[in-house]
Amino acid sequence: TFLIQPFFADFILEILISTSSREVRQCALRNIIRLCKIETLACDIRAVIHQILIKARLPLWPSSATTRSSNQKLLSQSIEYFDLRCQLTENLTKQMQTTLNINSKQILTNEFNWLSSYTVSTTSNELRTIDNILFMGHLRFIRTLLTCENINKIEFGIDFIRLIIDQFLFPASKRMSSPIVQTNNENDSLDDSVPEPKCSTSESRLAAYDVLVELVRNCRTNLRLVIDDLINLHHRPILEKQTEWEFMPQVNPRAHCGLVGLYNGGATCYMNSILQQLYMLPQISEHILSVPDDLDNTNGTNKTGDSSLFYQLQQVFGHLMESKMQYYSPESLWKVFRLWGQEINIREQQDAFDFFTAMTDQIDEYLKTMKQEEIFHKQFEGIFCNQMICTNGCRHRYEGEERFMALNVAVKVDSLNESLNQFVKGEVLDGNNAYFCAKCQEKRTTIKRLCIKKLPPLLCIQMKRFGFDWENNRALKFDDYFKFPLVLNMEPYTLDGVNKRESFVAYDDITDSTNNDSLINNATTTTNDSKFVPRSLNNVSSNMPTINYELIGIVIHSGQANAGHYYSFIKDIRRRHSNHTNQWYRFNDTSVEEIQLTEQMLEEECFGGTFRVQKDNNNSSEERTRFWNAYMLIYQCIEPSKLLPPPPPVSSSSPNTNRSSRHIPGTAVRINRTNQRDSLSQLADLVVRSENSDLFRIEKPLIPSHVLSCVKDENLEFLKNRDTYCDDYFQFIYKLSKICFDDINIPYDMEIIENDNDETSYELCTKLALNFLLNTHLRTHRRLRKDNSQQWIQLLGRLFTKNSTSCIIFYDLLFEKNDYGLKLYLLDCPIDDIRYIFEQICENILQATYSHVLEKHEQIQETNINDNHETLIINIDNKLLLLMKKFIEQLINLLDKYVVEQVKHSQGYFQLIYYYIKINKNSIDYLLQLNTFTRLINFLLGENIDTRRWNSGQAKEFGIIHEIISTLALACNLNKNIFNEQDIQLKNQMEMYFYGKWSNRYLKEICYAFQEISPSQLTCTVQLMEILALNNQTFSEQLIRIILHSITQAHTNDLKSLFKFLSYILVSLYKKNF
């Protein structure tokens, strides 16, 4: 009764999709599924709810997420709706589809059309999230529809596979694998060239993976299409990366704030902090990037190559602007940068201010040679004025100019303002130190001081926090408290500002002496008590003019003088590339995060000084030093018009003065004396501000083409790596690789679903698994490989055992590189667990090969060969056997050279030979044909008969070599008195080492082995020595003599094993004789 009520449909939809609580929707989903499982005679509950969902008018098939807010809410809450439809649609039969009036083919077609036409949001992270929720629901529904009866997977497969792989999962990989199309359009944007996958969250990508898995299940055509695509996109062997192991690419995107970090090469944080400061200054970074590619060609030079510092700085700025990765590693810049003419050691800390000075000088010098504007001098350069002012007798004044790129201020005072006062306070020169006035030709009492004649647009201030203790010969850092304002008024420290405040300054008889070297002095002045000392600059009237600078960058040093860390606080003043203007950020190497730079944070993070902390054990507190504090500051002028020179005064005789308006009696006359200056100031402000705005800027690429191309390629590589080097993708490949074992259920309709050939499915899965393992999985970092290697070994073992052609695929892949494949994975690889995994795979392939050869051999013996099928079996049998022999031959050939070079990695190699020996007797025959015994003995003993080849640390791993040698020897006839045609006769080389001139050296190595290796690992060796001693009296006497000699030379801890060995031999001889 409840189900047929008119409100039931609205109730279901309300609690399933309209409710904002996810817990309520999840609970509703579970209970509706339980309700559908109830069987009643009155009605089919499943059919009723199914019809409600189908007939519901829901906006879940929009063209994009940019719809009304109410619909966006429904889209973000739609997962439970799709999950319920999936539950009700799973494995629907034809009869059920007819009953429910459902056309699964048409629905699937509609879903494909919707996926193909949907427009992904690119401007909003919130809309992007809705996109992925919607994709997740639809993809899950598509996977469910593919399980329905009467669905031809081949018919839908190619379209869905192309769409999902090329657009939803791996568009960057597809772009990289596609042929490069040349274009002449230089205005192609970077975003158009770097495609993002439509599925950008883990949940939506998992749903897309599940669709692909369902498409290939029981469908060989789709399986081949998907596997070929994945191998071509991601798992082809790359020659230049053959020796790369523990590969862990960048898979983390830009920080949420949209900024890119810089990698620390060991101690390059001083570089990173300065480079980020320079990049965040748009007038700097945009100018650097605006230098055209063909600049050098026009000058007939080639200085913007890889060896150019300017080129590498462009690369850094280009990556910081357009890279999609979390950080950029400026390795090339480390190589080309020179500090004081010397290459830098990236693991040696340097001074950040020294790097700033060297970098700006070298870049400006380069721009000067290229006849370009020296951008750093334009933005950071100011002019000091060195003044010598005579104060008694005459009023002569001498001035000299000196250019500066930064102000160096002492931190022994309380604040930046007090430190700047030292520049202009002055020093009195009198008595014997009096200055000789050139005009008066006599000494005068003089004020010597320094002030700023011209302020730069960007003011860099370095705090003198580092010094040197010459007595104790150690570097010092001054962590004194030193505060600075967010807005700094520099007007009191300028030449005009000082002149306005000094009562003794006269404006006549001024002599410029710019070229007078004696007046050029960049040191700060000292003060003496004198009546000539000027008034304090702190007592300034509030209506005096200002030249305000705002703080936009702070470089922090944390630590001691000889060891520490640099990081930066930077205010975002960009307009073109940022939506968060005036937001502060912390740049700490690869990490970039937003911060709120409050007065309290400035106090705690930048000013230094001391603070008190509460002790744990009592209520007392202790004082500690803040060893992290500001080292460099960057200020930007708020009013750039005040930095321009004043306009020339208007002459009183100008004709315009007679054109004043007629005076009307009885009215006041208003005289505006500042009109002209104000107009010029406003115009100057407009010009300067327009340079940093988009008002007159022509839209064109800011990045040079060579940098743009590099960033684009790296972004493509990043997107490809991000989409493939992750747990979800690795598990997806594993599911595909074992899909042939999941194809157990017979399809509903054999006429429309392809009748798979099982062997072909095994071959395709083997091809994918091997290419993935050898070219990707085994080369990744252990964090990605985790502990799932055993499941891959077992899977390959099952594939090799199930299908002989799978074994051939392995051999073919390995032999593409001749013997390099075995050498690479068994010897050259420095990772122990990777060598072990490959050795286990080789054991599986040898065992499976032998089983297939034996099985086919038995089949041929039992039946007569009368048809082509049996002939094919023989061909496969012969090919497989030949491939296995070739494998063993290449394996043994490595003994001659490569095993000696990589002896520390050889344990798995010898383990594989030992495993092959144990397969059957034919294995021993083939190894003896390859002269394996002699090769192993030569490896073990070397060519020198007197000295031992391997030291004790190396030889303790050679127990398995002794066992292989002994096993090969035991397979031969060691008793010359007994002859049997079926026995393998003892080789001449064996006799030489057992009874000939090399026997003494070999037996000594055996005694060493019993001292260094556990006797439990030498069972075959003991057996061989026993048989040789029993069959040859000369050998037994020699063996006993060498054992006794070894006992006299051995360490006490090794005597037990030697005595046991001797005892065993003596007991055996005693039993034979008595």
Image (cartoon, grey):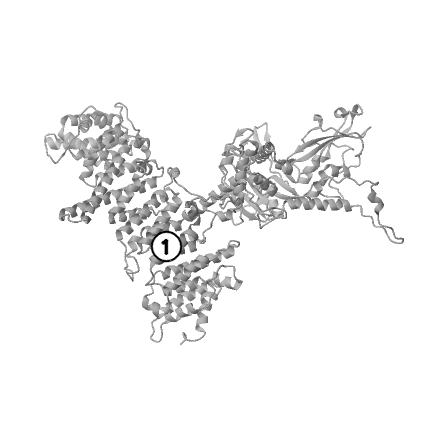
438 left or right of 960 in image: right
Q: 783 above or below 474?
A: below
Q: What residue lies at 67% left-to-right and 37% top-to-bottom? A: 419
Closer to the camera, 302 or 439?
302
Q: Can residue 396 be seen in this view?
A: yes
Question: Whole-percent x and y of residue 242?
Answer: 37, 38
Residue 688, by quadrant, is top right
339 left or right of 533 in image: left
Residue 551, by quadrant, is top right
Question: Whole-percent x and y of residue 266?
Answer: 49, 36
Q: Give the residue at the far front of this rendering.
A: 184
User: How many marks on residues?
Assistant: 1
Question: Whole-percent x and y of residue 22?
Answer: 46, 62
Task: Provide the secondary structure element on which disc 1 rests.
Answer: helix
Q: Give the residue at the far right of this rendering.
A: 665
Q: Name the image quarter holding the N terminus.
A: bottom left
Q: Name the image quarter holding the C terminus.
A: top left
Label 1 crowding class (10 Å Cα cut-off): few <14, some 14-19, many 20+? some
Question: Whole-percent x and y of residue 353?
Answer: 59, 35
Type of the residue with mark 1: Ile
Residue 945, by quadrant, is top left
776 left or right of 68 in image: left
Q: Can residue 564 be seen in this view?
A: no
908 left or right of 268 in image: left
Closer to the camera, 717 or 355?
717
Residue at image mark 1: 158
Q: 398 above or below 694?
A: above
